[in-house]
Image (spheres, rainbow, N blue to C red):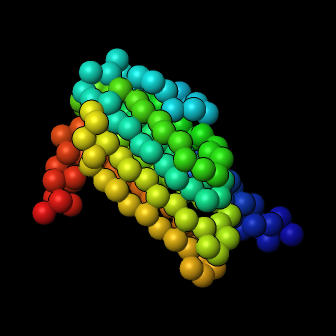
Amino acid sequence: MRGSMEPGVKKLALVLLGLVIALVWAANSRSDRGDYDEVRRMPAVVFGGGGGTLSVEVNTSQPAVLHATFARWDDAEENETGTKVSEPLPAGTLSRGVDIAADTYIFLEIEVEKPQVGATLSWTVSLDGEKLFDDERRLDEPLEGGRAFSLQLEADDIDELRSQAEEGAT
C-alpha cells in the first residue's frame, strides 16, 4: 500500500512547489511597481509643476468618473512614483486643471460607468490655455459587453502631448 501512495504524494509536493514558485515570482515581478498617491480629486500641482498647466473642461449628461495618472520613472531607483486620481463627477459641466512637470507621464479618462442610451460626453483639453483636443460622444445604442463610454488621452510627457495635438490638427 505504501508504494501506491508515493506517486500521489510526489504529485502533491510538485503542485505545492509550483504554487510557491508562482507566488514568489508574482510578488517579485509585479507590473505595477511604484509608489502612487491615490486621491479623489485632481491635485493643483504634480511633481512641482513648471512644465505646463493641463486643463480639462468636461460636460457629461450623466454622472461620470475622472481617472488620471501622473507618473515619473526613476532609473536609479528602478521605481515609478506618481499620483492616481479617481474623482466622481456629477452630471453637468466642470473644469479641472493641474500644473505638471515637463517630464511627467499623463493619462486622462472621463468615463460614464453605467451609461444610458442618449448619454453625452464631451471635453476640451488645453495646455497653458491653448486648446489641444476637443471631442464629444453620444451613446445611441446600449453598450455591448466589455465596452466603455469614455474619452481618454495618454502621453509620455508634455512634449508628446503637444505633438499629438499638432498631428491631430493636420
Query: Quadrant of residue 103 in the image?
Result: top left
Q: Residue at x 56, y 51 (%)?
A: 22
Given the current orientation, which residue lies at the most extreme front position? 93
Give the left or right position of residue 108, taking residue 120 as reference.
left
**Residue drawn at (28%, 36%) of the image:** 129
How many discs mark residues in the rendered view?
0
Question: On the rendered image, what quadrant is the C terminus found in?
Answer: bottom left
Furthest residue in direction top, as rendered: 48
**Which one is in front, 156 or 61?**
61
Q: Position of residue 63 (x, y in %)?
A: 66, 53
Q: Residue at left 44%, top 39%? A: 69
Q: Percent position (x, y) of residue 149? A: 54, 66
What residue is shown at x 32% (from left), y 30% (from top)? 53
Residue 86 versus residue 154 in the image, above or below: above
Report the front residue among 37 and 13. 37
**Is 163 left or right of 1, judged from the image as shown?**
left
| 59 relative to 98 in the view: left or right | right
Residue 68 appears anywhere in the view: yes
Instruction: Choose between 53 and 15: the one closer to the eye.
Output: 53
**Which residue reaches farthest left?**
170
Q: Position of residue 38 (x, y in %)?
A: 57, 31
Question: Which of the 4 image quarters holds residue 152?
Answer: bottom left
**Position of 94 relative to 97 (above/below):** below
Quadrant that contains the N terminus: bottom right
Identify which residue, 10 or 40, lies in the foreground. Answer: 40
Question: Residue farthest to the right?
Answer: 1
Residue 17 shows up from this direction: no
